[in-house]
Amino acid sequence: MSEHHARPWQRGLHMAIIVLGLGIALFGVVWLTTGKVTCRGVEMQPGDVCTKSSFTDLTTTQTQSYEQRRHAMRQSQPTVIGSGLVIAGFGALMLWRSGRPPVSAEEERLLARH
C-alpha cells in the first residue's frame, strides 16, 4: 500500500479552516463580551432605542432598547463560540485525515462484513 500525502494546498486549506474556526470562537469570546452595542453602525448608550429593520424595509414599527440589544448579543455568544469550535474541529479532522493512507478496496470489504 502506498503512502498517501495530501497536496500542499489541501493541507494549507485545512489549516486555514482551523484558523477561521478559532477566529470565530475568539470573536465570540472577546467582541460579544466587550463589544459596543450599535444600531446600524451607530454606537448606542444605555437608554437608547433602535428601530429594527427588515430585509424589505429599512424601518419598521418594532424597536429594541440598548438593554435588549446587549442581551441578544450575549445570548448569541455560546452559538458563535460553539460554531467556531466545530469549524476548527472539522479543519483539524481534515488535516489529520489528509496524512493517513486511503482505505483499500480489501479493507472496505472487511469493514462491510462487520
Image (tube, grey):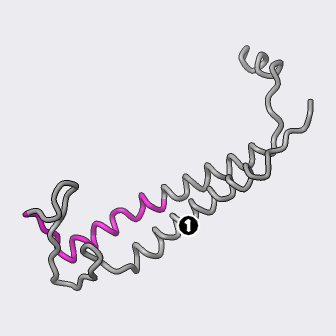
Q: Is 71 situated above or below 44?
A: above
Task: Determine which quarter of the picture holds residue 67.
Answer: bottom left
Which portion, as a residue range, is magenta?
61-81
Residue depicted at x 7% and y 63%: 61
Residue 87 lies in the magenta stretch: no
- Chief SS of the magenta region: helix
Q: Is 30 situated above or below 10?
A: below
**Picture coordinates of residue 11 (x, y %)?**
74, 52
**Picture coordinates of residue 75 (x, y %)?**
33, 64
**Picture coordinates of residue 91 (x, y %)?**
64, 51
**Picture coordinates of residue 78 (x, y %)?**
42, 61
Q: Is 109 situated above or below 78?
A: above
Task: Determine which quarter of the picture holds residue 85.
Answer: bottom right
In the foreground, 44 or 71: 44
State the residue position of label 1. Answer: 23
In the foreground, 85 or 3: 3
